[in-house]
């Protein structure tokens, strides 16, 4: 290696040193015949100075040329010091210049101040990644990964890789499948997660396993989803939920400390699933602010407001949020116009509301509530002058969906969301099953390998609607970071769960026979978690979009504009794979 220093190294301690630097030309400025260049690499910028009389090649330099230079470090004039740069007190007077590669004019700016559109960034990702911000993102990702290795090793976990070519098994999303050339008509699946294999590792006596697992799922995309993502996968034998929680909390603490220098407080708060749904309308609550949902069914029962009465008669609930001090923010026009339309996206048929003024409730619906009803509402909602009360009355699922989104909208309006605060929690004891109206049957609420809580083990088939399990989700600021559980290790319990979701013994043996076989020979109780590594890194950096921390992500159509994938393959390859394409009907 020729270079003696990187472009983030030099300072006043290096004055008068002879140095060799490499990098890209960030900017070139001609000041009366003297050429100034900001030389960039992943470590930073160094200002270099050239006189074309001594260095003739300097006149040829343009943006993104790759160069090799030799020169002497000198101090910048006081008025030219750049305090924002590590190297801002010095510059290098160049005596030799070699152009290693003369670049064409790039189609995008390599500058954090002039960021291109998402589509252009993905098309020219090799240029986008040159930006200092993107290099910083990749470096934080590296640090988080290294901190994980170090922490897991210190707690006696063994790094073990599980297969990428696996047997297709139902795990929630659609599988990506790969045809086998040597086994005509047969296909591998790409793993949605290592779930089954890590459980088999526990049956194999591995005790404590982890890996950075690649998970591939054919599902609709959004900012926090990609067709392929990375998961910190963890599994442990002879454990209870609190053991997994303790390990994960220690890991999160280590990652935050070693990447961004933040001390995370542990232990994390534990919230029961039904408590979370009752108070926040969602199973991944943002605890940085209050705005809790209140069940006001009792307070509004038997009023003259038919919208509420019809809901209560069906056994459903009426819930309310107090948007404290927002009467100046939420006008009648805004509430009944834009805000109501916004909530209709989440299933609301309308948005009932009341404003507290001069110690009384006011709105177009107040007339339907007696003085006694109004008094109960004010007491239950702790309403004060200037507060606005929002109500939702419908099926429990719709009420939760509407008010959980309204809660976030209010928090944004009131600037209650502090981006410098990290509020973690565990949401625990989820339902094991959820009803699928389309198939008129039960589906696993998460996956079918979650151990029911002890009091529900014998009731799996008798009362599936109410069965609760050991699933626990790790949540940070309203974002789910990971999900895990204690697993089923008894083949009989596993088969009972499979029967509830409509899987007979023949189908169970075809799809999961190898796992059930492993569990026949003495499998320890075990549990673990899969943590979304991309999401963790994104939140460390203050982003929701995980594409910002993945080197080569896909767009929302699961395409890579840079390399053109997915793409067609030739007839010869199709023939070798025993595949015949069906023409799409017009």
Image: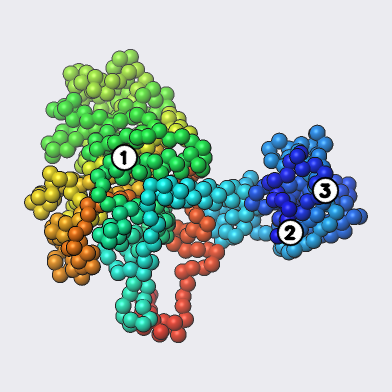
Q: Is residue 384 left or right of residue 111?
A: left
Residue 54 position (above or below residue 279): below
**CA separation, marks 2 and 3?**
15 Å
Residue extending farthest to the left is 462
Can residue 319 be seen here? The reply is yes
Residue 44 point in image, percent of width and height: 67, 47
Q: Which residue is mark 3?
A: 72
Q: Which residue is mark 1?
A: 426
Quadrant occupied by the N terminus: bottom right
> Which numbered marker is on residue 300?
none
Residue drawn at 54 percent across, 51 percent down = 138
Taking depth in this image into account, of 265 and 473 the one nearest to the observer is: 265
Residue 58 position (above or below residue 11): below
Residue 115 position (above or below residue 174): above
Residue 95 point in image, percent of width and height: 85, 54
Q: Is residue 579 left or right of residue 83?
A: left
Residue drawn at 47 percent across, 51 percent down = 145
Residue 340 point in image, percent of width and height: 34, 38
Q: Is residue 194 left or right of residue 39?
A: left
**CA separation, marks 1 and 3?**
57 Å
> Which numbered marker is on residue 2?
2
Residue drawn at 24 percent across, 32 percent down = 319
Q: Earlier in the sequence, mark 1 or mark 3?
A: 3
Residue 546 point in image, percent of width and height: 46, 51
């Amino acid at each position: 290696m020729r270079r003696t220093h990187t472009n983030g190294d030099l300072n006043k301690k290096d004055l008068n040193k002879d140095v060799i630097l490499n990098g890209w030309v960030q900017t070139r400025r001609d000041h009366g015949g003297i050429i100034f260049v900001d030389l960039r690499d992943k470590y930073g910028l160094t200002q270099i100075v050239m006189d074309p009389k001594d260095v003739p090649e300097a006149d040829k330099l343009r943006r993104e040329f790759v160069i090799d230079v030799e020169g002497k470090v000198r101090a910048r004039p006081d008025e030219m010091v750049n305090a924002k740069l590590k190297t801002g007190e010095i510059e290098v007077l160049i005596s030799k210049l070699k152009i290693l590669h003369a670049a064409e004019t790039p189609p995008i700016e390599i500058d954090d101040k002039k960021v291109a559109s998402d589509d252009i960034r993905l098309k020219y990702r090799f240029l986008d990644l040159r930006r200092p911000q993107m290099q910083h993102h990749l470096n934080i990702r590296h640090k988080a990964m290294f901190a994980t290795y170090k922490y897991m090793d210190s707690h006696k976990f063994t790094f073990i890789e599980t297969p990428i070519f696996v047997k297709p098994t139902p795990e929630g999303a659609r599988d990506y499948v790969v045809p086998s050339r040597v086994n005509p008509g047969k296909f591998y699946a790409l793993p949605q997660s290592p779930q089954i294999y890590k459980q088999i590792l526990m049956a194999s006596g591995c005790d404590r396993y982890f890996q950075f697992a690649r998970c591939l799922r054919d599902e609709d995309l959004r900012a926090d989803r990609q067709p392929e993502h990375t998961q910190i996968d963890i599994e442990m034998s002879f454990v209870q939920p609190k053991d997994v929680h303790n390990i994960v909390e220690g890991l999160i603490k280590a990652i935050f400390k070693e990447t961004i220098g933040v001390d995370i407080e542990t232990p994390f708060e534990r919230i029961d699933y039904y408590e979370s749904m009752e108070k926040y309308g969602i199973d991944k609550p943002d605890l940085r602010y209050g705005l809790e949902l209140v069940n006001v069914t009792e307070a509004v029962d038997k009023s003259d407001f038919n919208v509420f009465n019809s809901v209560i008669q069906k056994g459903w609930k009426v819930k309310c949020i107090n948007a404290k001090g927002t009467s100046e923010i939420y006008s009648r026009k805004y509430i009944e116009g834009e805000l109501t339309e916004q909530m209709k996206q989440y299933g609301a048929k309308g948005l009932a509301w009341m404003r507290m003024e001069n110690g009384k409730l006011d709105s177009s619906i107040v007339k339907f509530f007696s003085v006694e009803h109004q008094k109960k509402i004010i007491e239950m909602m702790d309403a004060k002058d200037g507060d606005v009360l929002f109500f939702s009355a419908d099926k429990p699922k719709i009420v939760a969906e509407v008010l959980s989104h309204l809660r976030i909208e209010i928090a944004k309006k009131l600037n209650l969301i502090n981006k410098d605060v990290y509020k973690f929690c565990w949401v625990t004891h989820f339902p094991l099953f959820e009803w699928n109206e389309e198939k008129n049957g039960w589906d696993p609420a998460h996956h079918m390998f979650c151990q029911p809580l002890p009091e529900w083990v014998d009731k799996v088939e008798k009362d599936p609607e109410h069965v609760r399990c050991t699933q626990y989700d790790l949540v940070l600021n309203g974002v789910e970071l990971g999900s895990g559980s204690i697993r089923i290790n008894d083949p009989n319990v596993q088969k009972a769960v499979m029967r509830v979701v409509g899987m007979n013994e023949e189908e169970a043996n075809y799809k999961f026979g190898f796992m059930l076989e492993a569990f026949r020979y003495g499998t320890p109780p075990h549990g673990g978690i899969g943590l979304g590594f991309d999401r963790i890194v994104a939140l460390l950096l203050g982003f929701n979009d995980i594409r910002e921390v993945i080197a080569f992500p896909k767009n929302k159509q699961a395409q890579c504009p840079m390399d053109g994938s997915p793409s067609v393959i030739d007839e010869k390859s199709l023939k070798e794979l025993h595949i015949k394409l069906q023409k799409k009907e017009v």
